[in-house]
């Protein structure tokens, strides 16, 4: 990456961006909303401490709208867009992704496309607040309180600069409080090296000042939160993105220190016993799972409006297929189903293929493969519904017509009355089979496959019941999951097997805000940071041992039910809206179901493990342990072959990236990890068909927002020339 420095003066408009006075962030720090215009609050110890508490509000911004997935998941090897094209430019890397904010006028599908200025503006908003606290911390006489406040401020500033660095490269470094008095101050665009070193310094200060306990309760940044991110930043400095300057920093020192920090975190913040505990076994607002020791950083949300911000937590929208549409009405959505079917993030073939679907429990604890019938679209007509109380026919002609339609339905799908589905049966099934699975052809003993109104004859061999919608990943060795969607268009599909990590059955409205916390860092990733550090030190089998310790949790345990499934929808059991009439779901008599009734029949606590794998039923423990770096799993070898990588270090870097997918799929950092390792172009071209045509080296960085550049002035107060503006922009943009 090219390093550069430009000295400028900044206008009032640009300063407003730095101060964070943008419309998208106005509501976040409700606790102390007046600090943007006055730092008087910070003249007291209590005010300074309160302001430090308000820092936590800044991180909630990421999850209130479309930003979280647009800037971290789209355009990678893991996710592509579904049929909904709200944030499509971030995935396709076409000309609509540029230094200007994308709007409907410039080609965006709607007004919700994340602007390129969004992260830039909001990160500086938090930085501005952190600078104020650091500058006024001496007002806090109590040393313990002072260190906590300063530790939190250093952490947020470090975190925000980390995000800016990861996305934009060199940015403006401001470590002093700003205000109206700073108009006309000389600003410099720091080099990437300078920004990353500031990040490391801030995280070091946070590490030294923050206590080890969660003194504020769940979500508190601790010494171990700082240790995790400090290790991550040190690893970043030794990664490919920093090759222009990292020779000045001994790799042995950086990576050894990072490993030691990771070991601290791993010891003090052990893994949750069950992967389900992290995301699936979420029973409601502020439940015990949100206090797991593994969670190092989370955006806090609950029933308090102060935690909701302007847009609240909308992450439940992102990962579900459009099941209410493609099911032909058999499965209706509602808040009792933990997510919404907004079809934003569609997994790629790579994602389905990288798991060992027999031995890795994470696959079955991540993907939702079964939806229950909560709305009967077709059912055998009951004569009693066409007769009066005495049994006399009142609608015989209609009965005969409906019976004829019913018999046609049976014939078209090659089923009998006994095979016909009833309320609560399987309505949608995703079969996560492998490419070499010979059981699933166009016609097999399992029947033909279809969706919605398309006639097919799939009868679940486990239940003996016809299933209205069945979607295997592979048919006859061909990837077909992307062909079920909108008119069979692989680039625009609304049918895919989504993930459950954000599902929330506590919502009181179908489109209401979510009240569950959003995990932003956890010890599971710490293991992977440590393992990659070991790889870069060429300690390959030590890295395998580290990964094996993480994979141990992912193994099926002795006696574990491999077909059991649970997700955040279970929170609906304690939801105050459970008994309200919904009006969308009906039984075989046409009676409307209450929300609770709809939940009870839609949330089937099973997955498709056995039908997907074809193995005999078992309760034996599985084995995911890897013997050596020269004997990687078959799933990894297939990916490495497809990528054409060779050499122990390169193979192991890509293996760690694969393991990141298995452990951290959808956890808000994939684009940044691929940018850091400069593998984005290779992996997106190979595994993301919608990104492949346009992704290029310039996309390792985002464009600097044009609105910011246009607001800059020179020493004489004049607007910058075109060449001066161009010097501020990242290469290729």
Image: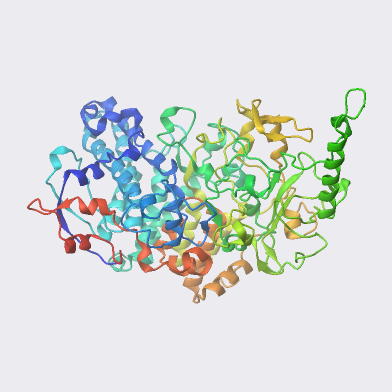
What residue sits 30% from the left and 48% below the top?
202
Q: Is residue 355 visible?
A: no
Q: Residue furthest top?
A: 389
Tell me if 606 is positioned left or right of 263 in this view: right
Q: How many marks?
A: 0
Q: Is residue 685 above or below residue 470?
A: below
What residue sits 29% from the left and 51% below the top?
201
Q: Residue furthest front?
A: 397
Instruction: Name the image quarter holding the C terminus.
Output: bottom left
Q: Position of residue 480 (x, y in %)?
A: 65, 63
Q: Is residue 218 visible?
A: yes
Tell me if 686 is positioned left or right of 554 in this view: left
> In this figure, which colouring scheme has been used for the structure?
rainbow
Near-viewer residue (371 or 543): 371
Write down the quadrant of residue 183 in the picture.
top left
Q: Position of residue 262 (x, y in %)?
A: 45, 53
Near-viewer residue (313 or 643): 313
Tell me if 347 is positioned left or right of 533 in this view: right
Instruction: Name the image quarter holding the N terminus.
Output: bottom left
Near-viewer residue (210 or 732): 732
Q: Position of residue 598 (x, y in %)?
A: 69, 34
Q: Residue furthest left?
A: 716
Q: Is residue 507 above or below residue 410?
A: above
Tell me if 679 is positioned left or right of 195 in this view: right
Near-viewer residue (109 or 681): 109
Q: Position of residue 414 (x, y in %)?
A: 84, 55
Write down the quadrant of residue 548 in the picture.
bottom right
Q: Is residue 34 above or below residue 254?
A: above
């Amino acid at each position: 990456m090219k390093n550069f420095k430009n000295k400028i003066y900044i206008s009032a408009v640009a300063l407003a961006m730095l101060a964070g006075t943008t419309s998208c962030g106005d509501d976040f720090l409700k606790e102390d909303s007046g600090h943007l215009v006055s730092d008087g609050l910070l003249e007291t110890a209590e005010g300074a401490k309160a302001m430090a508490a308000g820092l936590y509000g800044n991180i909630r911004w990421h999850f209130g709208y479309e930003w979280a997935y647009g800037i971290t998941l789209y355009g990678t090897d893991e996710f592509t867009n579904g049929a909904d094209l709200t944030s499509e430019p971030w995935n396709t890397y076409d000309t609509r992704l540029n230094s200007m904010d994308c709007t409907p006028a410039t080609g965006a599908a709607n007004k919700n496309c994340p602007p390129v200025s969004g992260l830039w503006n909001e990160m500086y908003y938090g930085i501005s607040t952190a600078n104020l606290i650091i500058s006024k911390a001496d007002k806090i006489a109590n040393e313990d309180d002072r260190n906590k406040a300063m530790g939190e401020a250093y952490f947020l500033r470090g975190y925000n600069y980390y995000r800016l660095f990861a996305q934009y490269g060199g940015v403006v470094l401001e470590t002093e409080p700003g205000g109206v008095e700073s108009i006309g101050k000389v600003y410099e665009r720091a080099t990437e090296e300078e920004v990353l070193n500031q990040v490391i310094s801030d995280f070091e200060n946070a590490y030294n000042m923050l206590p080890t306990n969660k003194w504020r309760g769940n979500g508190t940044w601790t010494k171990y939160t700082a240790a995790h991110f400090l290790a991550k930043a040190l690893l970043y400095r030794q990664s490919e993105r920093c090759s222009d300057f990292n020779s000045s920093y001994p790799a042995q020192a950086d990576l050894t220190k990072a490993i030691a920090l990771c070991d601290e975190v791993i010891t003090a913040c052990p893994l949750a016993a069950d992967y389900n505990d992290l995301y699936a076994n979420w029973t409601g607002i502020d439940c015990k799972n949100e206090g797991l020791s593994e969670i190092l950083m989370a955006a806090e949300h609950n029933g308090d409006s102060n935690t909701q911000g302007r847009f609240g937590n909308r992450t439940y929208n992102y990962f579900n297929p459009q099941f209410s549409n493609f099911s032909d009405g058999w499965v209706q959505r509602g808040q009792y189903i933990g997510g919404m079917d907004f079809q934003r993030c569609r997994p790629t073939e790579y994602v389905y293929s990288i798991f060992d679907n027999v031995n890795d429990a994470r696959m079955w604890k991540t993907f939702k493969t079964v939806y229950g019938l909560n709305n009967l679209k077709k059912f055998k007509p009951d004569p009693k519904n066409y007769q009066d109380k005495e049994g006399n026919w009142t609608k015989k002609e209609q009965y005969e017509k409906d019976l004829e339609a019913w018999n046609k339905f049976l014939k078209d799908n090659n089923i009998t009355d006994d095979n016909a589905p009833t309320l609560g049966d399987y309505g949608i099934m995703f079969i996560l089979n492998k490419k070499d699975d010979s059981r699933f052809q166009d016609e097999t003993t399992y029947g033909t496959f279809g969706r919605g109104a398309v006639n097919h004859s799939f009868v679940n061999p486990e239940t003996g019941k016809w299933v209205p919608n069945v979607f295997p990943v592979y048919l006859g060795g061909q990837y077909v999951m992307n062909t079920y969607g909108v008119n069979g268009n692989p680039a625009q599909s609304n049918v895919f097997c989504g993930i459950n990590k954000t599902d929330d059955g506590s919502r009181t409205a179908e489109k209401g805000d979510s009240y569950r916390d959003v995990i932003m860092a956890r010890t599971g990733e710490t293991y992977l940071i440590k393992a990659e550090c070991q790889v870069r030190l060429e300690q390959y089998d030590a890295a395998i041992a580290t990964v094996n310790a993480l994979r141990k949790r992912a193994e099926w345990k002795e006696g574990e039910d491999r077909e059991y499934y649970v997700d955040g929808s279970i929170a609906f059991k304690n939801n105050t809206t459970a008994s309200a009439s919904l009006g969308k779901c009906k039984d075989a008599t046409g009676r409307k179901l209450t929300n609770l009734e709809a939940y009870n029949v839609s949330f089937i606590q099973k997955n498709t493990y056995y039908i997907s794998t074809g193995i005999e039923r078992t309760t034996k423990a599985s084995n995911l342990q890897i013997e050596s770096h020269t004997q990687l799993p078959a799933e990894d070898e297939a990916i490495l072959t497809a990528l054409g990588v060779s050499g122990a270090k390169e193979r192991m870097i890509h293996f760690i990236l694969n393991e990141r997918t298995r452990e951290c799929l959808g956890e808000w950092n994939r684009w940044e990890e691929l940018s850091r390792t400069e593998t984005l172009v290779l992996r997106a071209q190979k595994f993301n068909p919608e990104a492949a045509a346009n992704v290029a080296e310039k996309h390792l960085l985002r464009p600097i927002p044009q609105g910011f550049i246009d607001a800059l002035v020179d020493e004489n107060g004049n607007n910058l020339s075109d060449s001066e503006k161009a010097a501020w922009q990242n290469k290729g943009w």
